[in-house]
Amino acid sequence: MTIMKSHASKLSAAITSICLLSTPALATVTDPHGVDVGDGNTLNFDQNSAAIGNSVKATGLNSGAFGYYTNATGRESFALGNQSTASGDFSAAMNKFNTASGQGSFAIGRHTTASGEGSFSTNYATKASGWHASSFGSYTEAKGGYSAAFGVYTVAETSAAMVTGIYNELTGGDPPPVSG
């Protein structure tokens, strides 16, 4: 099994390098366990990661960073675009100036942040910091666990809350934990 995995990694790197070597000045395969294409990239060579672009960092196990100043530092994370960071394990950040720091989080758009575990943030300047929270629109914030914020300048602060519209806010504390 280990031998097959090792050969598969080498084969994958070889195929990638063959495709990329059509422009030899741009492509350099540095290790069979990682691919580094571009200038000023950072890569952990024993982590099966890929760094493609300019000043990108792919240091998480099985991570990929593509674009311009992107960072994929979480395990099995993916960053694509311009100055986006996927630091949470199993997270993804795409487009421009996005951060996915929660485990299993996803940030896409511009200036979005998904910091809660399993959170999702999209569009422009949105934040999803609650556990499994979702934030859509512009300047929206989903702070409570399982909360969702849609629209413009909306805030869902309580647990399992959903706020829509413009300049709407639902605040209050999360309910106390249930003991069993």
Image (spheres, grey):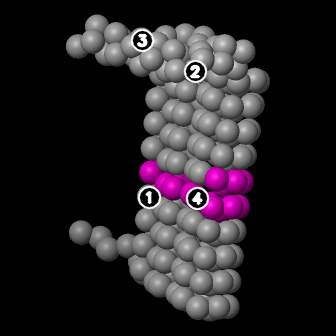
- Image quadrant in which the N terminus is located: top left
Residue 13 visible in the picture: no
Residue 143: image quadrant is: bottom right
Q: Earlier in the sequence, mark 1 or mark 4?
A: 4
Q: Earlier in the sequence, mark 4 or mark 2?
A: 2
100 in magenta: yes
Label annotation for residue 108: 4
Q: Where does residue 102 sit, x and y in percent of width and height?
A: 52, 53
Q: Where does residue 170 sit, x and y in percent of width and height?
A: 56, 89
Label annotation for residue 118: 1
35 in magenta: no
Asked whether 51 or 91 is in front, the reply is 51
Q: How many angstroms separate mark 2 from mark 3 (CA)?
A: 15 Å
Q: Where does residue 95 sit, x and y in percent of width and height?
A: 64, 53
Judge whether 103 appears above or below 116 on screen.
above
Q: Which residue is mark 3?
A: 10
Q: Where are the magenta residues, as a range?
A: 95-113
Q: Is residue 76 left or right of residue 169?
A: left
Q: Earlier in the sequence, mark 3 or mark 4?
A: 3
